Each structure stands twice: as C-alpha cells, then as structure tokens.
Image: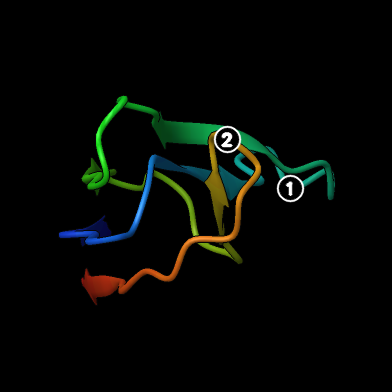
Amino acid sequence: FEAGTFDSGGDIDLELYGDPDGDNVYEIMRDATTTGDDEYLNYTTTHSGLFFLRVFAYDGISNPYEIRMTR
C-alpha cells in the first residue's frame, strides 16, 4: 500500500489504521506527520482486511488536498 504525493493549502497529516489481530479494534499501522504541506506513506501489509486512511489538518483548518494511491 502506498499513499502519497499530497499537495494541500496547509499542513496536513495522515494515519493508516488496520486490524492486524482480527479483534475489530483498529490501530494506527503507520502515520505521516511532517510539518509540510505534503505527506508520503508506505506500508507493507502482513494481514488482509479493511484499512482506513485518516487525513486531517494539523492546525484544524480545512485544507483541500489530493490523494494518489497505488497498490
């Protein structure tokens, strides 16, 4: 899983959540929280199932952004 090349109007961060032990409790598998306006996240999964990507503005302000994902 790769998600990257964010371009936004301010500082955004992202977190990838997964459930590696299958107990329906999702935890952060990887995060990208630099101080810039772009982020890159790369994660090699060791389990199947659903994953969630949370994108949020560090400063709480709504920022437009673009996500490019590959697998």
In the picture of the structure, the residue carrying the numbered disc 2 is 59
* Quadrant position of the N terminus in the picture: bottom left
Relative to the observer, which residue lies in front, 38 or 44? 38
What's the mark number on residue 63?
none
Q: Position of residue 46 (x, y in %)?
A: 38, 44
**Residue shown at the point (60%, 48%) measured from the top left:** 18
Q: Label 1 is placed on what type of residue? A: Gly
* Frontmost residue, 22 versus 26: 26
- Name the side, left or right, on which 26 lies relative to 20: right
What percent of the width, then of the height, locates residue 55? 52, 54
Q: Position of residue 14 (x, y in %)?
A: 46, 45
Q: Quadrant of residue 65?
A: bottom left
- Mark seen at residue 22: 1
Dot 2 lies on which element? Answer: loop
Q: Earlier in the sequence, mark 2 or mark 1?
A: 1
Q: Quadrant of the C terminus?
A: bottom left
